[in-house]
């Protein structure tokens, strides 16, 4: 139930993200979700893509600093209060969130979470009958 | 192994006697053949007769790089041009280049001293030596070349650059020895790793590196990356080129070939000799050169000398690692900073690649001090905090070593330019009035 996320170190220079997006596009790799964490001189681009192995191969060949991290992705109704409920569950279980990002689509919202304790997080979410997404589910989006 | 045991293992007394005889001869030679030196000696009221032993060297005037520029191109030659068989020149990043001339005998001295350096690190006539120093006006390529031929080894005269081919031929020919700048050695190490050719398919065992100052940490880095033993070869164009000295297999200091190049250490401010073993500016007098002898030439290199006999059996004086060329020293917000200090901090931290760039500028009348570094692949993180920790770590270490906190900028892999020759690691954009 874990999803592989790519993290790419990018200098804050004009056109860096454009290049990555282009490389993925040319290789027919779809970006399902992404987020950027940045400071004044560099950013970390976090990506969920349709073909992890292929994307890593291409990025490494182009000398990008790319790392792979396991993240949890869950689906919840796109209505007020559903995120609060999930966060409560996570907090009460004593899990610390390193970072998270989300995207919604019609009636559903998808949340990507990088917790400090992956296994515990998955366990707690399952106990609470939340819908965890597998990689294959995500790529269908 | 020792190339010239008589000289390299000579007693200190005999060496000083030999140096005295040779000093008298070279002073006589320049007094009569170089107006520049004669005039300087006359101004100081000395004649060649005042030089009897090596101790009298302190009576002689100093020579500095500007003297070579002022006498550009040939006014410091002490032999007629008909006797000069080779010219070399330094790149001369500021102003005129400096030009040096060699007689046939000068070239044979050069071959001899490079042969000593090669033999001292275990190179024999059986070995293939890839010379990846630049060939041409720069002394590196042809200097090493002549030494390898002298010991009867096989030269692969690659010159610098063309890195893919360097690796291919190193592999196909089975080169055992590599001679180049330490920064190019690092780049070759990286490229070999990228090539996918297994390390055991190479015969490479020995590296002879020089032409730019390098640190002990850089040595470790190169030895690990290339899987070789790395040795220092020291020299400067003004004195002869590479081969003024070289390390032996003990790696405990650079042996100076003092029967040809007499070293002194002086206080760079007072110009008085320092106490034995103390650090100061290295000064050379060429004792046997004919084409363009140098009298008490100030190298600007800061180091110290050790006259104890080495474990290898050689008695020749050993120089400690060059702290830096006093020309290279940066004064940032009133603090003296040597690029070698920055290098040693970066290389002692496993999280960073051994490539860096120092940028100094002045903004609103305040000096800025920025360092660009690349993070090693295995230390990249998806978490911003961890990446920022890396920056803090290096800045804190710099603060404690240099006393000045740099602004550290993490840059993308391979974005710092890899050098084929002498690396350019400092960019100082301050416009000083």
Image: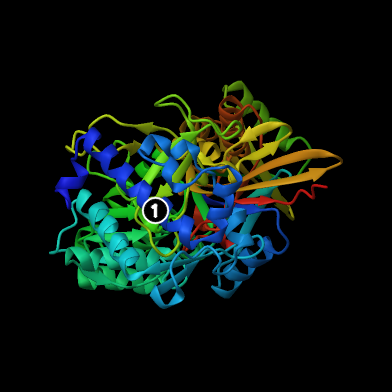
- On the question of residue B195 being in view, the answer is no
> Around disc 1, counting alpha carbons within 10 Å, would you say few (fewer than 14), some (14 to 19), or many (20 or more)?
many
- The residue singled out by tag 1 in the image is B26
Chain letter of mark 1 equals B
Asked if residue B204 is positioned above or below residue A76 in the image, the reply reads below
Asked if residue B72 lies left or right of residue B166, the reply is right
B287 sits to left or right of B152: right
* Residue B360 locus on image (x, y percent): 70, 45
Residue B35, placed above or below residue A69: below
Colour scheme in use: rainbow
Q: Give left or right: position of B349 versus A41.
A: left
- The one of B209 and B108 positioned closer to us in this rendering: B108
Q: Which residue occupies 27% across, 50% down?
A: B227
Q: In which image quadrant can residue B147 be found?
A: bottom left
Judge from the rendering whether residue B261 lies leftward or rightward of residue A16; answer left or right.
Answer: left
Hey, which residue is sitting farthest right in the picture? B364
In the rendering, at what x and y percent does residue A39 appear? 71, 43
Q: Position of residue A14 (x, y in %)?
A: 73, 61
B272 or B38, nearer to the observer: B38
Q: Residue at x 76, y 39 (%)?
A: B367
* Label 1 element class: helix
Residue at point 33%, 42% (across, down)? B20
């Amino acid at each position: 139930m874990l999803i592989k996320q790519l993290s790419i170190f990018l200098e804050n220079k004009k056109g860096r993200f454009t290049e990555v997006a282009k490389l993925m596009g040319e290789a027919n790799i779809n970006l399902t979700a992404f987020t950027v964490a940045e400071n004044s001189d560099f950013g970390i681009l976090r990506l969920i893509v349709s073909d992890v192995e292929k994307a890593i191969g291409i990025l490494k060949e182009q000398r990008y600093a790319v790392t792979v991290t396991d993240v949890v992705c869950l689906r919840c109704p796109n209505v007020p209060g559903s995120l609060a409920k999930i966060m409560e569950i996570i907090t009460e279980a004593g899990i610390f969130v390193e970072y998270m990002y989300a995207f919604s689509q019609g009636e559903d919202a998808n949340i990507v979470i990088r917790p400090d304790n992956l296994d515990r997080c998955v366990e707690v979410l399952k106990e609470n009958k939340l819908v965890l997404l597998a990689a294959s589910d995500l790529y269908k989006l | 192994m020792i190339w010239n045991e008589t000289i390299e293992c000579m007693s200190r007394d005999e060496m000083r006697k030999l140096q005295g005889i040779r000093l008298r001869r070279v002073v006589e030679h320049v007094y009569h053949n170089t107006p520049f030196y004669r005039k300087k000696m006359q101004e100081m009221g000395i004649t060649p007769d005042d030089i009897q032993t090596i101790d009298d060297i302190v009576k002689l005037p100093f020579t500095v790089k500007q003297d070579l520029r002022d006498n550009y191109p040939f006014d410091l030659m002490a032999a007629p041009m008909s006797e000069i068989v080779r010219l070399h020149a330094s790149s001369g990043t500021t102003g005129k280049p400096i030009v040096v001339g060699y007689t046939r005998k000068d070239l044979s001295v050069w071959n001899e001293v490079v042969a000593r350096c090669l033999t001292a690190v275990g190179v024999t006539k059986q070995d293939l030596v890839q010379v990846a120093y630049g060939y041409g006006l720069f002394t590196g390529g042809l200097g090493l070349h002549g030494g390898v031929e002298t010991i009867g080894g096989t030269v692969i005269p690659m010159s610098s650059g063309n890195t893919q081919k360097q690796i291919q031929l190193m592999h196909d020919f089975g080169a055992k020895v590599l001679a180049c700048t330490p920064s190019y050695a690092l780049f070759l190490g990286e490229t070999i790793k990228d090539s996918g050719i297994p390390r055991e398919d190479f015969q490479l065992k020995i590296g002879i590196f020089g032409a730019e100052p390098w640190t002990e940490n850089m040595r470790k880095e190169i030895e690990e990356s290339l899987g070789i033993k790395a040795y220092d070869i020291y020299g400067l164009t003004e004195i002869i080129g590479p081969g003024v000295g070289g390390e032996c297999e003990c790696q405990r200091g650079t042996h100076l070939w003092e029967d040809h190049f007499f070293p002194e250490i002086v206080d760079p401010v007072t110009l008085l000799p320092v106490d034995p073993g103390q650090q100061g500016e290295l000064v050379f007098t060429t004792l046997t050169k004919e084409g363009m002898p140098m009298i008490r030439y100030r190298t600007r290199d800061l180091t110290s000398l050790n006259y104890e006999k080495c474990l290898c059996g050689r008695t020749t004086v050993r120089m400690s690692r060059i702290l830096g060329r006093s020309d290279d020293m940066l004064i940032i917000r009133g603090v003296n900073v040597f690029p070698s200090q920055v290098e040693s901090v970066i290389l002692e931290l496993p999280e960073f690649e051994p490539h860096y760039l120092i940028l100094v500028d002045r903004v609103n009348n305040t000096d800025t001090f920025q360092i660009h570094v690349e993070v090693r692949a295995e230390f990249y993180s998806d978490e911003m905090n961890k990446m920022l920790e890396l920056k803090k770590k290096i800045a804190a270490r710099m603060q404690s070593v240099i006393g000045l906190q740099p602004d550290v900028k993490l840059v993308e892999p391979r974005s710092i330019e890899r050098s084929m020759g002498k690396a350019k690691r400092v960019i100082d954009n301050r416009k000083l009035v």
